């Protein structure tokens, strides 16, 4: 795991002005997602989270505000907040969201936020939890979630149990985790980690999609390819999956 400072500099350097050609096509920076199109992906995420429209919502690791923008278009009465450790991305997100009165973004670490207890109805992570300490992050989310509030985790997962991978696939996976400094678990490990933290009830989990074309294009050429020494043949057997939890009332 890299330090917060390292992740901040990495996102400031590689996912701001250098990614401008990508931002013309998508503002949602998920490597694994069912839809390439932001409008469709936003609708899908809204459905997965069960958003009704008047909730106080928080995105942890909000990138350049791409998911927030789609949710704001769908739910003008919702109060939508985003936090991100990268100040460079927060600046871009402010521009992306400038026409939406119901959106606000700030520079914060999702493992240690500035929010009061029981502040949100819905908290979601889209491919961001893997940068942090999993249990610490879940504990902090529970703290700031209202009783009965929902926690949505959209993650990159190993396709099968990690110990069922062949040596070659396991080595590809470990290389991926090291070079992208992103923790990737299998579904059962995620479920058991959350259960160990306690205080949440699983409502739904589903598994979806292969790598997005946008992400593959970003790693085919340019700075990201160089930085990660990335190649398509090095992508391990991983995919997207999501987990919807509800905070139990004590
Ligand atoms: C793969 S991007 C996903 C962005 C966004 N969720 C989306 O779907 O477009 C991961 C994001 O998490 C942010 N991040 C990583 N660790 C963080 C932390 N500890 N606190 C807040 N944000 C963090 C990164 O700066 C980056 O914006």
Image: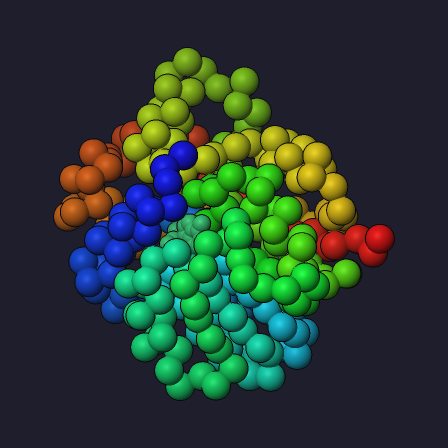
Residue at 70% from the left image edge and 34% from the top image edge = 196
Q: Nearer the viewer, residue 58 or 29?
A: 58
The image quarter containing residue 66 is: bottom left
Residue 35 seen anywhere in this rendered image of the structure: no
Question: Quarter containing ligand 1?
Answer: bottom left
Question: Residue placed at 40% from the left, 86% from the top?
Answer: 99
Residue 131, percent across and down? 43, 43
| Most foreground residue, 235 or 100 | 100
Q: Which quadrant of the figure contains the N terminus? A: top left
Across and down, in percent, residue 247 comes to 74, 54
At x 36% / y 75%, what residue is drawn?
94
Residue located farthest toward the right when viewing the structure as drawn: 250
Q: Is residue 144 visible?
A: yes
Looking at the picture, how far across and down is residue 216, in whole percent?
Answer: 29, 46
Q: Across the whole image, how many numbered discs are drawn on residues?
A: 0
Question: Front-most of 119 and 36?
Answer: 119
Residue 23 in percent (x, y) is at 27, 65
- 123 left or right of 212? right
**Left or right position of 133 against 210:** right
Please, which residue is most extreme toward the top here?
167
**Residue located at (18% from left, 58% from top):** 18
Query: Which quadrant holds residue 27?
Result: bottom left
**Rendered position, 146 above or below 161:** below
Looking at the image, is 99 positioned above or below residue 90?
below
Image: 25 above or below 213? below
Q: Nearer the viewer, residue 95 or 158?
A: 95
């Amino acid at each position: 795991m890299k330090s917060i400072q390292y992740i901040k500099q990495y996102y400031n350097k590689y996912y701001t002005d250098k990614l401008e050609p990508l931002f013309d096509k998508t503002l949602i920076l998920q490597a694994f997602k069912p839809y390439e199109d932001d409008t469709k992906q936003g609708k899908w995420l809204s459905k997965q989270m069960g958003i009704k429209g008047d909730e106080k919502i928080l995105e942890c690791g909000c990138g350049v505000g791409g998911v927030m923008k789609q949710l704001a278009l769908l739910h003008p009465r919702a109060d939508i907040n985003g936090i991100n450790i990268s100040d460079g991305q927060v600046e871009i997100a402010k521009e992306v969201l400038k026409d939406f009165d119901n959106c606000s973004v700030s520079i914060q670490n999702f493992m240690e936020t500035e929010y009061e207890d029981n502040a949100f109805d819905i908290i979601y992570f889209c491919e961001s939890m893997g940068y942090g300490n999993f249990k610490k992050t879940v504990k902090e989310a529970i703290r700031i979630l209202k009783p009965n509030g929902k926690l949505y985790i959209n993650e990159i997962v190993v396709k099968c149990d990690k110990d069922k991978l062949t040596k070659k696939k396991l080595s590809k996976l470990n290389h991926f985790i090291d070079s992208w400094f992103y923790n990737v678990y299998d579904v059962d490990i995620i479920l058991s980690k959350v259960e160990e933290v306690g205080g949440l009830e699983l409502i739904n989990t589903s598994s979806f999609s292969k790598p997005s074309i946008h992400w593959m294009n970003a790693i085919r050429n340019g700075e990201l390819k160089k930085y990660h020494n990335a190649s398509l043949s090095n992508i391990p057997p991983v995919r997207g999956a999501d987990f919807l939890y509800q905070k139990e009332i004590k």
